Image (spheres, rainbow, N blue to C red):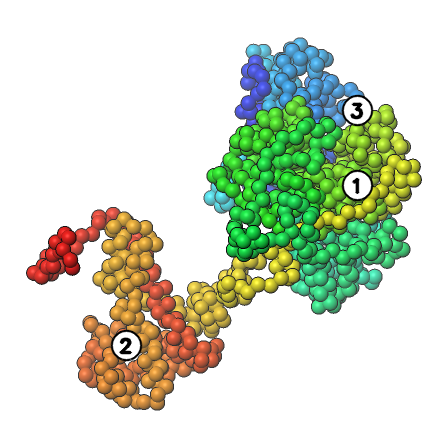
């Protein structure tokens, strides 16, 4: 998410509604003299080919549309509509309607962009003299908000930057006085209008801040002369605006409220309930790029997750499709494809990052693959590049699972379109992920080539496109990294011995190993101050804000591999939990880290800490960072969260500058100082950290925006130079806490850093600050640089790349312009990103030759034992499971019942009987069997309040106990005497039928054994007054079951027993039990042994318990609703016998 343009219709409603409501920074002379804003919107429906609402009276548009002279114009982020002939001015409603209908749904070319007109705005025409037109614009920059004003507005306003008067509202500074505003901006305005315009500008700026605008332009702003006794009237005719989409959680309700009046009054009954009082904000696509159904779906998916999912369809007929992980990496792949001369074949731009779930990745991949396999196959086939850098924390294998599901689903289409797939990925669990992809390619019969970190990030591009591979794309030979490194060798660290004796074992001194002996403790040590250019060293200690055990363990493992004497994390801060201790590994031993609830308490206990790694969410990171900045002890803060509102980020960075605090982020993975300190998950898993030689310092200091690309730089520098001295990913947002120049100046001042590396990107102007520093001699060290995003010039419409700040708003912000400017200033700039490794290698070798870098012998890092969970995930170890479960699984994207997805359970309408068949019997039973199970639950649900179970429930409920206690009290009465007849009847009827005895012989045998026949007999019902529940069961079974031998046998037994007594009938328990035996034996789903096992295990009794729970809960709720008091049984209903008593005297022997 990022700053996004909104429609003029929405912008005008926001401003008009909040102009007199938003709190102003200084007082105004009175209410705004803005006239009531009247706007209406009509949209063209491409399906019905009609306008909605129709431009006809009484069909949804306001009445003023049909009584006023109108202005009609497209509302699709089109610039200079007047010069393009897209204005209908001063016409009645019929003429305006005809003008719109003539153009709706038709393509139109504005400058070089062609798009379809589908959204229009209608307003009253405002006649006015030309000399009443003004221009006003508010624009946000890193320094603050600029207000631009000129007394000459309108279509011919000209070069605003050159002619407008400007006023900077600096971040954190006092808002200027009225006098300053008037003297700075309104110098050329007539005196009679100065106060009116000053008040308007104050209120407009208040709305701008309150609603988190990032850009707001009004041209022309019309100020009509005051009528006698009235103030001047203000009208705004054209408006363009951008909002900070990341501020939705703050301003969403305000945006919705202002747009509430856009809802038709007569449509209240049919309108769905929204989250806010009004419709949510609409984020239209740039003109010329109407959102496809697929793009809209991915945009919606992106908005509903903390991960990032982007898709832009560039050319549906293109041969080259991409599915790239990482915002920076996605730009690099597009650059490589364009540089290879295949920009015209590039079908899409997109990226997925931020650890999306398997399900989200599946939906994303399915959408792209569905687009690839549409239409007629291309004679040359198609290419799908599944690329990405080295992930920092995303489980590569987990995200690949979703992609593999989608590939298998579209197997036939992929084969028909002759799609070849090229995969390159690295990061946590990449080995398993690449293995799974390779096997997937083999199983679906689609050509697939798979590469890991041994290949440069874009090496697969020339291979996929069938062109010559440059030397930089060659696959390197790398030493395999052990997946499960052994324990550290002896003597590596005196504080953490390599051996770990099991607790209870006899030590050399004869004592036993105790649990406390395995804990390593570290004392607080306050070290001397560090130079300003070196915020991190081997003694740096930090707090981690938020419960992030995985990140903390990664930081401690890195510390241990670097040979640090103390962990870099001193404590955690978690305001939402109480004080406690958490245990982490320190090498092969363990250490304890305290968890505090406030920064104040943590800093008091740990005066040696001067760094905070802040993992707060985007919603709370502003408040938590403000709190951190109140503590002078803290000198550096890493803000990891993405989606921080730009106004918040800007305030934090300016406050940090005032306090002399370094902020890295937001929207960053952090940074790394090899051999010293690691922020959070920077660098990924330990195998990648070791492979990139980050356990010891090198000579190259780099700065990048992208976290994923910083990992690629770690990789490149590890084999082209002696490695990284320090690397920082400043984050991809528009206002990172520190910029390129801040870190490069540190590297310049640090004598141990010999070579600088800058990876810039399209959008923003921060690279030009570095260019100026090189030009004026502030930076003297050799600096290699490249700006990614050179592919942007290939796109005919505006494309938002993966990072919020990566969009060129002017020519100087393009990647090509930056690369040219850096080369001209003396930077060492390669021809393409693919040439970067060779360029770095050449510069590094020159520095060695000149003696500026003296290579050092490699050191062997201590090996870190792999965590059990991760090793288990990789299949490197095995352990017998403590429990076995075979009926359900919630670990995947979707809950599974006996292998059946929960969505399919509902799709196929299995009902509760079907769910029981899956969870109890681990198979899907026929529909009649599921229906019978539901009948059993209905028939056994209750049998009145007098039975023992219901009575227990009632008494417990009246004692004031909760539902669970009352339900359990009733259930505990179920046994042989109450509810147990089901199991007994099933056993006896099955035995009788299986023995071959006649029903009479069966009855005689039971009588001789002095046993009652379970399921036979009723206190009230009889042969002549049958139990209708039994009738229902018998009728259903005889109509639906394929055989009912056990039930027939039980009915024959009833014929025998009723000869003795009319009430010795087959009761409902017996009917259910016999029928259930027939279900198990006759449905074809069970063997004879399985059927007997289920009966033996009490399945029937389970049905009684489940059914009767319904009634018990009903009795509980009934008693609570009736507010019945504590029950005491009447004494006269209890026979008390106290005639025989035994009395024990104190002290007497028994």
Asked whether the beta carbons under mark 2 and mark 1 sit within 8 Å of each other, the answer is no
Q: Is residue 453 above or below residue 562?
A: below
Return the disc, 2 or 3, that comes first in the chain's sequence.
3
The residue that appears at 29% across and 84% down in the rendered structure is 1052
| Residue at image location 10% in from the left, 59% down from the top | 1141
Secondary structure of the residue carrying tag 2 is: loop
Q: Where 433 sits versus 211, above or below?
A: below
Q: Nearer the viewer, mark 2 or mark 3?
A: 2
Q: Position of residue 765 (x, y in %)?
A: 77, 31
**Is there a contact, CB below 8 Å, between mark 2 and mark 3?**
no
Query: Which SS class for mark 1?
Result: loop
| Residue with the mark numbered 2 | 1014
Confirm or deny contact between disc 1 and disc 3 (CB under 8 A): no
- Which residue carries the number 1 mark? 698
Can you say whether 856 is above or below 1066 in the image? above
Side of 643 relative to 941 (left or right) = right
Left or right: 158 in relation to 526: right
Callout count: 3
Q: Residue at x 18, y 52 (%)?
A: 1128
Mark 1: few/some/many CA within 10 Å (<14, 14-19, 20+): many
Identify the mark nearer the N-term, 2 or 1: 1
Q: Residue furthest front?
A: 509
Gap between marks 1 and 3, in whole Å?
49 Å
Between the residue at mark 2 and the residue at mark 1, the CA separation in whole angstroms equals 84 Å
Q: Nearer the viewer, residue 701 or 1147?
A: 1147
Q: Nearer the viewer, residue 346 or 102?
A: 346
Of the two numbered discs 1 and 3 in the rendering, the one whose residue sits closer to the viewer: 1
Residue highlighted by disc 3:
159
Which residue is more in the foreground, 195 or 824? Answer: 824
Q: Residue furthest left?
A: 1139
Q: Quadrant of the C terminus?
A: bottom left
Tell me the residue at 67%/35% (across/down). Answer: 539
């Amino acid at each position: 998410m990022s700053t996004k343009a909104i429609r003029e219709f929405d912008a005008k409603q926001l401003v008009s509604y909040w102009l007199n409501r938003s709190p102003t920074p200084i007082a105004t002379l009175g209410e705004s003299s803005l006239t009531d804003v009247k706007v209406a919107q009509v949209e063209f429906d491409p399906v019905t080919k009609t306008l909605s609402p129709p431009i006809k009276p009484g069909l949804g548009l306001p009445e003023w549309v049909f009584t006023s002279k109108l202005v009609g114009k497209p509302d699709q982020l089109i610039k200079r509509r007047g010069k393009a002939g897209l204005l209908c001015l001063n016409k009645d409603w019929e003429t305006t309607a005809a003008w719109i209908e003539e153009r709706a749904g038709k393509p139109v070319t504005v400058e070089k962009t062609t798009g379809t007109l589908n959204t229009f705005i209608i307003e009253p025409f405002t006649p006015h003299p030309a000399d009443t037109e003004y221009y006003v614009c508010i624009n946000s920059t890193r320094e603050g908000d600029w207000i631009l004003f000129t007394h000459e507005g309108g279509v011919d306003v000209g070069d605003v930057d050159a002619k407008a008067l400007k006023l900077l509202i600096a971040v954190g500074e006092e808002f200027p006085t009225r006098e300053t505003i008037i003297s700075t901006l309104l110098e050329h305005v007539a005196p009679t209008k100065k106060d009116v315009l000053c008040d308007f500008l104050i209120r407009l700026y208040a709305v701008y801040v309150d609603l988190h605008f990032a850009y707001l332009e009004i041209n022309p702003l019309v100020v009509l002369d005051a009528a006698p006794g009235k103030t001047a009237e203000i009208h705004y005719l054209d408006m363009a605006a951008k909002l900070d989409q990341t501020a939705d959680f703050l301003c969403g309700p305000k945006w919705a409220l202002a747009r509430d009046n856009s809802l038709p009054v007569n449509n209240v009954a049919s309108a769905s309930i929204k989250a806010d009082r009004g419709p949510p904000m609409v984020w239209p696509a740039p003109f010329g790029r109407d959102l496809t159904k697929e793009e809209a779906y991915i945009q919606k998916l992106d908005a509903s997750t903390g991960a990032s999912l982007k898709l832009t369809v560039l050319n549906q007929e293109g041969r080259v499709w991409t599915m790239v992980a990482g915002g920076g990496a996605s730009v690099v792949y597009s650059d490589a494809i364009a540089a290879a001369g295949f920009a015209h074949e590039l079908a899409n731009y997109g990226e997925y990052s931020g650890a999306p779930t398997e399900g989200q990745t599946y939906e994303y991949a399915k959408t792209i693959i569905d687009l690839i396999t549409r239409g007629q196959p291309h004679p040359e086939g198609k290419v799908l590049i599944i690329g990405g850098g080295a992930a920092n924390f995303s489980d590569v294998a987990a995200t690949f699972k979703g992609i593999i599901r989608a590939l298998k689903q579209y197997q036939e289409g992929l084969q028909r379109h002759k799609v070849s797939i090229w995969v390159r990925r690295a990061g946590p669990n990449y080995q398993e992920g690449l293995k799974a992809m390779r096997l997937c390619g083999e199983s679906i019969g689609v050509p697939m080539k798979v590469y890991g970190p041994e290949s440069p990030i874009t090496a697969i591009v020339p291979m996929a496109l069938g062109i010559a591979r440059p030397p930089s794309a060659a696959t390197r030979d790398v030493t395999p990294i052990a997946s499960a490194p052994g324990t550290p060798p002896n003597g590596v660290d005196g504080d953490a011995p390599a051996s770990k004796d099991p607790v209870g074992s006899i030590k050399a001194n004869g004592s036993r190993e105790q649990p406390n002996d395995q804990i390593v403790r570290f004392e607080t040590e306050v070290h001397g101050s560090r130079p300003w250019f070196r915020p991190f060293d081997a003694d740096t200690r930090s707090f981690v804000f938020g419960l992030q055990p995985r990140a903390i363990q990664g930081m401690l493992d890195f510390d241990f591999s670097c040979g640090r004497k103390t962990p870099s994390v001193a404590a955690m801060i978690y305001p939402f939990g109480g004080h406690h201790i958490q245990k982490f590994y320190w090498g092969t031993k363990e250490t304890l880290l305290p968890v505090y609830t406030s920064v104040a308490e943590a800093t008091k206990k740990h005066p040696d800490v001067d760094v905070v790694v802040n993992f707060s969410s985007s919603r709370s990171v502003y408040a938590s960072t403000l709190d951190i900045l109140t503590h002078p002890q803290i000198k550096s803060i890493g803000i990891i969260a993405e989606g921080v509102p730009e106004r918040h980020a800007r305030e934090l960075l300016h406050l940090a500058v005032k306090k002399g605090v370094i902020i890295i982020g937001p929207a960053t993975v952090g940074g790394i100082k090899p051999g010293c300190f690691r922020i959070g998950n920077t660098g990924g898993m330990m195998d990648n950290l070791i492979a990139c030689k980050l356990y010891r310092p090198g000579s190259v200091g780099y700065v990048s925006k992208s976290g994923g690309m910083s990992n690629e730089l770690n990789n490149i520098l590890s084999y082209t130079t002696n490695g990284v001295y320090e690397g920082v990913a400043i984050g991809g947002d528009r206002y990172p806490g520190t910029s390129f120049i801040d870190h490069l100046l540190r590297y310049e001042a640090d004598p141990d850093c010999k070579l600088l590396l800058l990876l810039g990107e399209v959008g923003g102007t921060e690279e030009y600050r570095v260019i100026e520093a090189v030009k004026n001699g502030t930076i003297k060290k050799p600096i290699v640089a490249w700006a990614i995003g050179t592919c942007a010039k290939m796109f005919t419409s505006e494309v938002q790349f993966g990072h919020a700040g990566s969009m060129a708003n002017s020519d100087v912000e393009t990647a090509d312009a930056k690369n040219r400017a850096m080369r001209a200033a003396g930077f060492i700039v390669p021809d393409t990103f693919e040439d970067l490794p060779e360029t770095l290698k050449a510069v590094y070798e020159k520095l060695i030759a000149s003696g500026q870098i003296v290579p050092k012998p490699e050191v062997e890092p201590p090996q870190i034992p792999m965590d059990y969970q991760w090793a288990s995930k990789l299949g490197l170890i095995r352990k017998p499971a403590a429990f076995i479960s075979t009926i359900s699984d919630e670990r995947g994207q979707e809950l599974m019942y006996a292998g059946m997805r929960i969505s399919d359970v509902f799709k196929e309408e299995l009902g509760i009987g079907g769910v029981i068949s899956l969870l109890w019997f681990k198979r899907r039973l026929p529909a009649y069997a599921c229906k019978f199970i539901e009948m059993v639950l209905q028939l056994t649900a209750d049998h009145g309040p007098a039975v023992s179970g219901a009575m227990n429930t009632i008494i417990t409920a009246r004692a004031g106990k909760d539902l669970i206690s009352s339900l359990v009290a009733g259930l505990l009465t179920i046994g042989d005497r109450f509810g147990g007849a089901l199991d007994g009847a099933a056993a006896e009827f099955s035995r009788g039928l299986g023995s071959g005895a006649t029903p009479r012989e069966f009855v005689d045998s039971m009588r001789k054994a002095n046993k009652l026949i379970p399921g036979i007999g009723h206190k009230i019902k009889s042969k002549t007054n049958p139990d209708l529940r039994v009738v229902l069961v018998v009728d259903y079974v005889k109509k639906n079951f394929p055989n009912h031998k056990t039930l027939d046998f039980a009915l024959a037994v009833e014929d025998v027993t009723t000869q003795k007594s009319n009430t010795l009938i087959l009761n409902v328990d017996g009917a259910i039990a016999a029928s259930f035996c027939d279900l198990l034996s006759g449905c074809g789903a069970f063997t004879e042994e399985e059927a007997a096992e289920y009966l033996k295990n009490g399945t029937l009794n389970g049905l009684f318990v489940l059914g009767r729970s319904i009634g018990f809960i009903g009795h509980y709720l009934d008693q609570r609703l009736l507010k019945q008091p504590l029950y005491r049984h009447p004494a006269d209903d209890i026979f008390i016998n106290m005639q025989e008593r035994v009395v024990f005297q104190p002290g007497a022997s028994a």
